[in-house]
Amino acid sequence: MHRNSDDDADEDDWNDDESDLEDGDDEPTVPCPYCRREMLEDSPRCPACGNYISAEDSVLSGRPAWVYVTALVCLVIAVGWALAML
């Protein structure tokens, strides 16, 4: 059976429409910088490895480093003072 060239053109149009729908439904993905698996571009954390993508999204980013240093210094001073009282 021989196909008409109009039938080929109609089939090509249908295939183009289908590929446009597939591309439009997908959200953009990027590879994770740690495990290289695909993840959503706007995701703050990789679902595969669990690493945060940006520093401001990480768990420790809520407090600056000086807070931890100050707490450690105060702890050392308190322990030294407590030992001096013995």
Image (cartoon, rainbow, N blue to C red):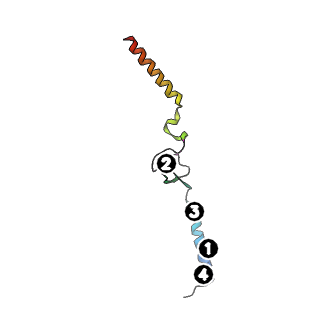
Disc number placed over residue 7 in the picture, else none: 4
Range shown magenta: 44-54
Q: Which callout, 2 or 3, points at the residue further toward the start of the chain? A: 3
**Residue 48 forms part of the magenta stretch:** yes
User: Looking at this rendering, what residue extends furthest in the bottom direction?
Assistant: 1
Mark 2 and 3 residues: CB-CB less than 8 Å, in contact? no
Mark 3 and 4 residues: CB-CB less than 8 Å, in contact? no
Q: Secondary structure at mark 2?
A: loop
Name above or below for residue 27 compared with residue 77: below
Residue occupying image coordinates x 48% and y 24%: 71
**Which tag is nearer the camera, tag 2 or tag 3?**
2
Residue occupying image coordinates x 49% and y 38%: 59
Q: Which callout, 2 or 4, points at the residue further toward the start of the chain? A: 4
- Local packing at callout 3 (Cα closer than 10 Å; few below 14, some 14-19, many 20+) is few
Residue occupying image coordinates x 56% and y 49%: 42
Q: Secondary structure at mark 3?
A: helix
Which quarter of the rendered picture does the N terminus lie within? bottom right
Q: Secondary structure at mark 1?
A: helix
Q: Is residue 21 left or right of residue 46?
A: right
Mark 1 and 4 residues: CB-CB less than 8 Å, in contact? no
Q: In this figure, which residue is indicated by the disc labeled 2?
A: 34
Q: In this figure, which residue is indicated by the disc labeled 1?
A: 13
Cα gap from disc 1 to disc 4, whole angstroms: 10 Å
Indicate the position of residue 68 as horizontal and vertical percent values. 49, 28
